[in-house]
Image: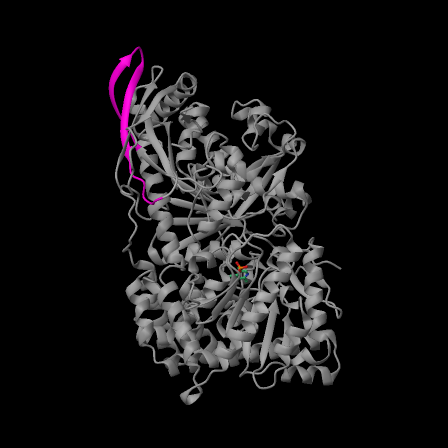
């Protein structure tokens, strides 16, 4: 029997406890320990059972407890202090980031993402991409960047993992009750839900919006699960990464096109759109449509305006990881949309094709995003490089290093990820600034001042807490499975709170090679079995429901854990999520990360570990390629970032390196104890990492980078382009068309360098060339000497571009240009000359795709 209606019944909160709701409905609790303290002191056990969810927690407090609290003066005064702290945080207006002329209180940037990982109690994330988005919002809040988040509200979130007795992953999909979460349904003045509609194949999809307050930033989550929608539409926001390709396309239409509509329905007008991964690339199209419809712009001018104010971050260095839709599926959903943009469908599809002329090529969201954004970036230096290679076909005229995809390395939100116990130490020795200004080198230098013993004892306490947590979780798992009592009791003895603890937890994508350590089981068993210098491993992670290879790796590890004598020293924790991550990243000694280079775009869990004094042991991929120091002073590297042709050989070689490192460096260092049982070398390394890496690998630095490099220039450009009835945008579009038609007539000839005698490092070499501008004004081109050292194949191994200045006209249309470059190092050196378009509103001269090289 199904009930006809469902209610949420909540306790009656005494009037003087109402401020608790303010604390519960702002996700600031996820990075402010005082708020959590307040809740957990009411009822620690209940708090622990509420999965860090204050709304559920308050709703499950008994009426009696509430009455008691309401008369407890001490509690009330603590509550008021905490609420005051929240209000003070919310009202602070200072910011390091300035958008001149922006309306105060209005967001300037809208950050679109398929997933957001903010707190374990809002399970709308699957892994690194979502956590990054969550940390981005938190840092934007701390830094007062006027930003708003846009995402989807998944009723069943991402799946919960449960393993069968033989280690096979099963997925569970609990149905979450939004009323019991720290989010609120957005309503209008008449208390009716704010909704809007999207046309989806001749039908109307109705969307409502939930709001999550993330400190000073709002995150809006779209929800289609409402009775007015037909069942197949209601399912659209059921699961993250849950459906088939058709549902994925519908979800991406919802996120991109719907996201822009949601902003309008909310009365928000952010100027800048930041697309976190290609899932939201349709947002660019919707803006183009609106600029055409509402502002009377041509398609071309609207594209200029939309792209100039769009920032795109790509995350996926694996071609298969980028969404690609078959043309016929696209046609079913987007043909009418293309018509509205005034585009023939073939032209529309070309926007998402690497080769616009290839009719068979599927429509790739990443390509669309790259074409609709004038600022593109990867998420580490190495990934920037990989991305330029991967997407060079979108800009076929350019040498790979000139493909307009830069990089901004990811960071993590320290106040969210640093353990409370350590935070106390940081507060004392680093000062409160490590929370507000973590990219400050001076702040982290103070980590030197933390007494070794204090740092080590705190770390040991966190390891004990982790071991406790693991035992508790294992017990719960076993009880749920109905295991024998002896087995449940044995769970109390797993792991050793004193032993060297190595953690590995992340999504079980095959390239991450969770099973690398299993390559040579004898060598592994020797490490685990050493009773003097014990080593133990904790694994956790989910495989994507359709990824059987990933599931097999989980099974391998689980079965190994169960085999004979390694049981107490090797465990697999079920259902990896932010909470499990927190315990592991704070309590392990070593964080193991061995992806196949260069497939990890950045990796962020290692940064969280580092901020907690956990030492990284990793292949030189993603962020670690930037962070690692050759002398092993901040952590260890597995290999030197080599890329192998034969993956099996690579696994063999790298696993051997890994065992040797463990045997000869990691274990001996950990157990090299001096006075007071302190591992001096180990603590030295912990501090080195904090001092050297702390200022760089945090999300405040990251968000400031985005603001400085992308948001602010794009914002200023947007303002300039839209003045006087969008005149500059229209001019820019006109200019672009003009360049497109005249460009083919451009010529370069008579490239000459000064007579070469001996050339010395650092001495200028003059270059002259003649350029035919074909009616293009000289101020509209950039003529450059392109020079650099050459590799063995005679290709540029690095390069520098120097501008050349125009001189006199030599004959009809040919103009003389001159300039000079300086070789910076001895060796073989080369140069050439090239011409690029230039316009003051074109932020990146490469984005037009026009270039001419000397021949
Ligand atoms: C940080 C984090 C990740 C990302 O980890 P990677 O090292 O990038 O793989 C994934 N899941 C959770 C729960 C995290 O906290």
Q: Nearer the viewer, residue 310 or 322?
A: 322
- Where residue 679 sits, quadrant-wise, is bottom left
Residue 50 visible to the viewer: no
Q: Is residue 821 magenta?
A: yes
The foreground one among 780 and 258 is 780
Relative to residue 21, is residue 10 drawn left or right? right
Q: Is residue 137 visible?
A: yes
Q: Quadrant of the C terminus?
A: top left
Q: Main secondary structure of the magenta part?
A: strand
Q: Position of residue 337 (x, y in %)?
A: 56, 29
- Which quadrant, please, contains the N terminus? bottom right
Q: Residue at x 63, y 32 (%)?
A: 361
x, y (%) of residue 720?
30, 32
- What segment carries the magenta color? 803-826
Q: Position of residue 519 (x, y in %)?
A: 67, 66
603 up-or-down from 713: above or below: below
Q: Is residue 839 left or right of residue 512?
A: left
Where 510 sits versus 58, above or below? above
Q: Quadrant of residue 677?
A: bottom left
């Amino acid at each position: 029997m199904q009930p006809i209606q469902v209610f949420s019944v909540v306790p009656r909160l005494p009037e003087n406890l109402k401020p608790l709701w303010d604390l519960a409905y702002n996700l600031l609790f996820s990075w402010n320990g005082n708020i959590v303290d307040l809740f957990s002191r009411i009822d620690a056990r209940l708090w622990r059972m509420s999965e860090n969810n204050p709304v559920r927690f308050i709703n499950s407090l008994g009426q009696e407890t509430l009455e008691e609290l309401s008369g407890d003066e001490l509690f009330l005064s603590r509550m008021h202090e905490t609420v005051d702290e929240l209000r003070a945080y919310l009202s602070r207006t200072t910011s390091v980031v300035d958008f001149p002329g922006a309306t105060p209180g209005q967001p300037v940037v809208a950050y679109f993402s398929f997933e957001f990982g903010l707190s374990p109690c809002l399970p709308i994330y699957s892994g690194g991409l979502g956590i990054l988005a969550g940390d981005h919002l938190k840092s934007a809040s701390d830094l007062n960047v006027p930003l708003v988040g846009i995402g989807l509200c998944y009723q069943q979130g991402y799946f919960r993992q449960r393993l069968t007795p033989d280690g096979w992953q099963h997925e569970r999909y609990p149905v979450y009750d939004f009323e019991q979460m720290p989010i609120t349904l957005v309503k209008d003045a008449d208390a009716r839900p704010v909704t809007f509609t999207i046309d989806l194949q001749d039908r109307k999809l109705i969307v409502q919006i939930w709001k999550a307050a993330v400190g000073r930033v709002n995150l809006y989550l779209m929800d289609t699960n409402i009775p007015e929608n037909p069942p197949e539409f209601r399912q659209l926001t059921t699961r993250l990464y849950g459906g088939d390709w058709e549902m994925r396309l519908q979800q991406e239409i919802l996120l991109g096109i719907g996201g822009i509509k949601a902003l309008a329905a909310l009365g928000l007008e952010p100027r800048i759109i930041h697309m976190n991964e290609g899932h939201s690339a349709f947002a660019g199209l919707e803006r183009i449509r609106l600029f055409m419809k509402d502002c009377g712009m041509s398609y071309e001018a609207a594209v200029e305006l939309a792209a100039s104010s769009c920032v795109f971050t790509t995350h996926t260095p694996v071609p298969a990881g980028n969404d690609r839709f078959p043309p016929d599926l696209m046609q079913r959903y987007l043909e009418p949309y293309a018509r509205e943009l005034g585009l023939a469908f073939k032209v529309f599809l070309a926007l998402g094709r690497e080769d616009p002329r290839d009719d068979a090529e599927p429509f790739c969201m990443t390509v669309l995003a790259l074409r609709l954004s004038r600022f593109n970036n990867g998420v580490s230096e190495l990934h920037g490089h990989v991305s330029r290679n991967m997407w060079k076909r979108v800009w076929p005229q350019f040498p790979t290093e000139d493909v307009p995809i830069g990089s901004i390395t990811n960071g993590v939100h320290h106040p969210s990820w640093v353990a409370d116990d350590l935070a106390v130490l940081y507060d004392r020795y680093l000062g409160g600034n490590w929370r507000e200004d973590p990219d400050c080198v001076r702040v982290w230098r103070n980590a030197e001042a933390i007494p070794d013993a204090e740092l080590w004892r705190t770390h040991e306490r966190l390891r004990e807490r982790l071991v406790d947590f693991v035992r508790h979780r294992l017990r719960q798992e076993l009880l749920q499975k109905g295991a024998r009592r002896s087995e449940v009791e044995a769970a109390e003895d797993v792991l050793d709170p004193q032993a060297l603890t190595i953690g590995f937890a992340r999504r079980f994508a095959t390239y991450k090679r969770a099973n690398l350590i299993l390559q040579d089981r004898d060598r592994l068993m020797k490490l685990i079995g050493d009773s003097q210098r014990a080593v133990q491993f904790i694994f956790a992670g989910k495989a994507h429901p359709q990824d059987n290879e990933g599931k097999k790796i989980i099974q391998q590890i689980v079965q190994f854990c169960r085999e004979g004598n390694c049981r107490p020293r090797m465990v697999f924790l079920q259902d990896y999520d932010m909470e499990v991550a927190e315990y592991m990243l704070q309590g392990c000694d070593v964080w193991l990360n061995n992806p196949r280079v260069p497939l990890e775009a950045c990796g962020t869990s290692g940064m969280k570990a580092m901020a907690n004094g956990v030492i990284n042991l990793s292949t030189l991929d993603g962020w670690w390629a930037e962070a690692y120091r050759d002398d092993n002073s901040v952590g260890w590297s597995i290999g030197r970032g080599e890329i192998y042709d034969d993956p099996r050989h690579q696994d063999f070689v790298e696993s051997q390196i890994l065992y040797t490192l463990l045997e000869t460096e990691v274990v001996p260092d950990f157990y090299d104890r001096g006075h007071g049982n302190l591992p001096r070398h180990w603590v030295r390394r912990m501090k080195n990492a904090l001092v050297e890496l702390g200022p760089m690998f945090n999300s405040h630095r990251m968000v400031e980078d985005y603001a400085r490099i992308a948001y602010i220039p794009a914002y200023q450009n947007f303002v300039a382009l839209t003045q006087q009835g969008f005149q500059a945008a229209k001019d820019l579009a006109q200019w672009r068309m003009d360049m497109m038609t005249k460009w083919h007539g451009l010529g370069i000839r008579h490239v000459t360098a000064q007579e070469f005698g001996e050339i010395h490092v650092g001495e200028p070499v003059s270059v002259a060339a003649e350029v035919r501008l074909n009616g293009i004004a000289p101020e509209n081109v950039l003529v450059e000497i392109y020079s650099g050292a050459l590799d063995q194949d005679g290709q540029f191994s690095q390069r520098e571009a120097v501008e050349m200045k125009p001189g006199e006209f030599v004959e009809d249309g040919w103009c003389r240009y001159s300039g000079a470059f300086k070789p910076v190092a001895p060796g073989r050196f080369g140069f050439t000359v090239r011409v690029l378009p230039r316009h003051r509103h074109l932020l990146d001269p490469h984005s037009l795709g026009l270039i001419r090289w000397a021949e």
